[in-house]
Image (cartoon, grey):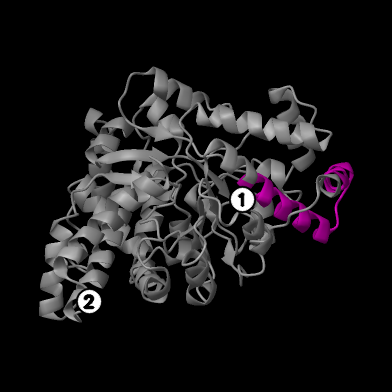
């Protein structure tokens, strides 16, 4: 085990001294900028209740599937990490025991971004400067526990300390957004907004789809057994979200397929997916049509669309059946964008009032498809290197793959996309360091002036995300 945390002041900067000095200067200009976190999955109840976090394992380990997917890959059962089972069977509840297990296996994270994020949290959030391991587990647990009992470590205080200007959570159309209402009514100045994630009511393969449609009709007063009533119900819920601060929608479809059916054809398809078990091709066509319908609604109400396909979710069937979704078993897939998006782009690709942000988990699409599409269509922007590629090497590959074709100004900066609250400043710090490294390389190669690089560093760290997400 190393005897110090990996928080060197030059971490992630180039080894070449001249380029490193350039990166340092650029980073110094952006390191303290406010954080815009426009796409994430933190729990709004944290900020509504503002209660102390319960214990180190519940705060740092349990929300972070990056951590327990690695532990699971090494044969550590999720029950031993305290992850609740669907069937109610017992799991480990002793937080200190869970923490010790995590510490015993922390060496597994060597070379991963999780290590960078975790060391950053220990040092900058808790003032701990010794690495986690078997010999330090109890001392670090006790130090974190002592901190969590203090008012300055409650959610709102940390939000302010992290210099978060705005953060977006993500909710289903069926959510009443009560936590967001309580935040708004509290008088607290922190900006926590929601994002509209319609997957439960637009994806026929989503668990409980037909029950979800029934519930959608109940809460909107619309007849969701017919196509027009269903679309009106979705418009109703979008307006409800907008009234509570939403500026974006979020679509996690398996593919980027879009369709542009005539209204009668769309109505027939809706009846087919609602009445019984649809064929896979019907479910895919319905999802495709709904992306186009969501684009049409965004043109009307101004919500920015985020489309992030290309993930085979819950790949591990046994794990899904035992623990449910979002347990670290989502796997990237090959993804087509050029043909898949063409129906939507033929209909709306040149509209000045529509904005669509594209993400991918298929890196092979970066330069071949995504950069060229975003470098042409006015409605398209590229989301950052994301999820499995939210990493130093992933970010560098992304910048090198897309910049020459899409430029910087068809990208949207960075988002952290996390449930792990304490990793947010760490993730943004990594992104700022990598962008400054990339910009320093361009300056050193005489492809960019240093003043231009300084302006771009600010844009990438702050302005692009704020502008793209209308925050």
Q: Quadrant of residue 117?
A: bottom left
Magenta-highlighted residues: 267-295
Specify whether 58 is left or right of 16: right
Residue 325 - label: 1
Residue 231: in sight, yes or no?
Answer: yes
| Residue plotted at (75% across, 42% down) | 209
Classify 10 Å Cα crowding around label 1: few (below 14), some (14-19), many (20 and above).
some
Nearer the observer, 73 or 30: 30
Asked if the magenta segment contains residue 99, the reply would be no
Q: CA distance from mark 1 to mark 2?
A: 41 Å
Give residue 264's position: percent from left, percent from top.
Answer: 86, 45
Counting the numbered discs, the total is 2
User: Magenta-highlighted stretch: main secondary structure?
Assistant: helix
Secondary structure state at the residue bearing disc 1: loop
Residue behind mark 2 = 441
- Residue 147, image x, y percentages: 23, 37
Q: Is residue 410 above or below residue 38?
A: below
- Asked which secondary structure carries label 2, the reply is helix
310 up-or-down from 470: above or below = below
Q: Which mark is residue 57?
A: none
User: Residues at badges 1 and 2 in contact (C-beta under 8 Å)?
Assistant: no
Name the residue rendered at 46%, 39% in the picture.
169
Q: Nearer the viewer, mark 1 or mark 2?
A: 2
């Amino acid at each position: 085990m190393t005897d110090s945390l990996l928080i060197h002041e030059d971490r992630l900067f180039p080894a070449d001294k001249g380029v490193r000095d350039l990166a340092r200067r650029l980073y110094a200009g952006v390191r303290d900028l406010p954080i815009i976190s426009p796409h994430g999955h933190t729990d709004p109840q944290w900020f509504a209740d503002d209660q102390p976090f319960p214990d180190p394992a519940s705060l740092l380990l349990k929300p972070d599937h990056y951590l327990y997917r690695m532990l699971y890959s090494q044969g550590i059962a999720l029950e031993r990490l305290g992850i609740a089972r669907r069937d109610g069977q017992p799991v480990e509840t002793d937080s200190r025991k869970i923490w010790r297990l995590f510490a015993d296996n922390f060496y597994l994270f060597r070379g991963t971004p999780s290590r960078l994020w975790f060391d950053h949290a220990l040092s900058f959030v808790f003032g701990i400067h010794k690495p986690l391991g078997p010999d330090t587990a109890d001392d670090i647990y006790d130090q974190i526990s002592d901190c969590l009992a203090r008012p300055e470590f409650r959610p709102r205080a940390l939000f302010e300390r992290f210099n978060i200007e705005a953060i977006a959570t993500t909710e289903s159309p069926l959510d009443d957004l009560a936590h967001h209402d309580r935040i708004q009514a509290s008088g607290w100045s922190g900006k926590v907004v929601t994002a509209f994630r319609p997957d439960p009511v637009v994806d026929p393969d989503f668990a409980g789809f037909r029950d979800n449609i029934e519930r959608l009709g109940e809460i909107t007063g619309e007849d969701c057994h017919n196509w027009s009533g269903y679309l009106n119900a979705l418009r109703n819920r979008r307006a409800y979200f907008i009234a509570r601060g939403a500026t974006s929608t979020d679509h996690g479809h398996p593919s980027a397929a879009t369709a542009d059916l005539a209204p009668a054809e769309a109505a027939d398809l809706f009846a087919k997916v609602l009445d019984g078990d649809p064929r896979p091709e019907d479910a895919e066509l319905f999802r495709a049509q709904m992306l186009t319908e969501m684009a049409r609604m965004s043109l009307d109400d101004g919500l920015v669309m985020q489309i992030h396909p290309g993930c085979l979710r819950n790949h591990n069937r046994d794990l899904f059946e035992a623990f449910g979704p979002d347990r670290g078993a989502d796997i990237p897939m090959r993804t087509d964008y050029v043909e898949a998006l063409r129906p939507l782009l033929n209909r709306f690709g040149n509209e000045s009032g529509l904005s669509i942000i594209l993400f991918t988990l298929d890196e092979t699409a970066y330069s071949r498809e995504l950069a060229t599409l975003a470098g042409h269509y006015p409605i398209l922007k590229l989301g950052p290197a994301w999820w499995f590629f939210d990493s130093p090497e992933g970010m560098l590959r992304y910048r090198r793959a897309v910049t020459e074709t899409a430029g910087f100004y068809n990208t949207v900066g960075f988002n952290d996309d996390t449930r792990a609250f304490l990793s947010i400043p760490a993730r943004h710090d990594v992104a700022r360091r990598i962008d400054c490294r990339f910009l320093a390389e361009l300056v050193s190669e005489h492809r960019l002036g240093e003043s231009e690089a300084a302006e771009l560093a600010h844009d990438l760290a702050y302005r692009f995300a704020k502008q793209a997400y209308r925050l």
